[in-house]
Image (cartoon, helix red, strand yellow):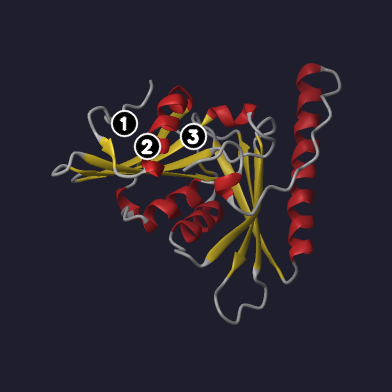
Amino acid sequence: MVYDFALEGWAPDNNASAECMWKLEIWGPELELLRAQSASEREWLVFYDSSQMWGLPGAAKFLGVHVARDRDHRSVRVEAREAPTEALAQRWLIASGAQPDALARKAGLPEPADEESRRIESHIRDSGVRYHVEAHHTDHQHQHTWALLRDTAPDVARPWVAQTERSVNRGTGGAYLIREERFTARSAALEWVRASEHRHHRAQAATSRCEHGGPSPTSPTATTASANTAHLGRART
């Protein structure tokens, strides 16, 4: 079901909002709502964007959207931000005024696979501006995402944070496993995430051979994404 942003009859408060409204209208059929919070005239939303699997290689698959209406002037501000993980999308919305505990998640969706995954996800969601996203890549075919973050907290011995997220078959709605390591050097962090991606590809290839009795297609090589998520895939407002 296409999400109804209910923006008909509302005037964008600036050119950026007008462009964002136009893009959301076009992309609407590809967006699956994952989380939502409404308060007064504001909405905070997290979507899964299925169209990104056909876009630029490595494009982020989550989209955060913030809608703020001004009834006195019948105007609306609409902002959107791509994110490689759901936790990073939530972090941006929280910085825009959302309440962490009020971003209700739809039932039946994949859940963190274990306690460590929940801990990492919660920490990033509530981290504010502490971590800068330096690079990321999502392999939509093999359901594997990595992100390279830089910790800006003072006196951090290992500021480079490498995270991986992959799908696992657990429960009726599925699950995702998140792992994290810290490094002193950016190059070492990138080496770790790419090694993780390679292991995931090999595991999936082995599973495919067992299930289908033949070789699986060659896994694509990981591609480093731009540090600015707003410029990955199609440009977002």
The residue indicated by pointer 3 is 48
Does dot 1 land on a helix, a strand or a loop? loop
The residue indicated by pointer 2 is 18
The crowd level at tag 2 (other Cα within 10 Å; few <14, some 14-19, many 20+) is some
- Amino acid type assigned to the residue bearing label 1 in the image: Phe
* Image coords of residue 79 (percent x, y): 39, 45
Nearer mark to the viewer, of 3 and 2: 2
Q: Is residue 145 left or right of residue 50?
A: right
Vertically, is 220 above or below 1? below
Q: Earlier in the sequence, mark 3 or mark 2?
A: 2
* Image coords of residue 235 (percent x, y): 55, 40
For image coordinates 61% across by 77% down, the residue present is 156
- Amino acid type assigned to the residue bearing label 2 in the image: Ala
Q: Is residue 116 visible?
A: yes
Q: Earlier in the sequence, mark 2 or mark 1?
A: 1
Nearest the camera: 212 or 30? 30
Vertically, is 79 above or below 234? below
Q: Is residue 140 left or right of residue 128?
A: right
Nearest the camera: 39 or 180? 39
Write down the quadrant of residue 12 in the picture.
top left
Q: Is residue 227 left or right of residue 6?
A: right
Q: CA distance from mark 3 to mark 2?
A: 22 Å
The residue indicated by pointer 1 is 5
* Image coords of residue 5 (percent x, y): 31, 31
* Image coords of residue 207 (percent x, y): 76, 29
For image coordinates 63% across by 30% down, the residue present is 55
Nearest the camera: 22 or 167? 22
Q: Is residue 84 visible?
A: no
Q: Is residue 138 left or right of residue 216?
A: left
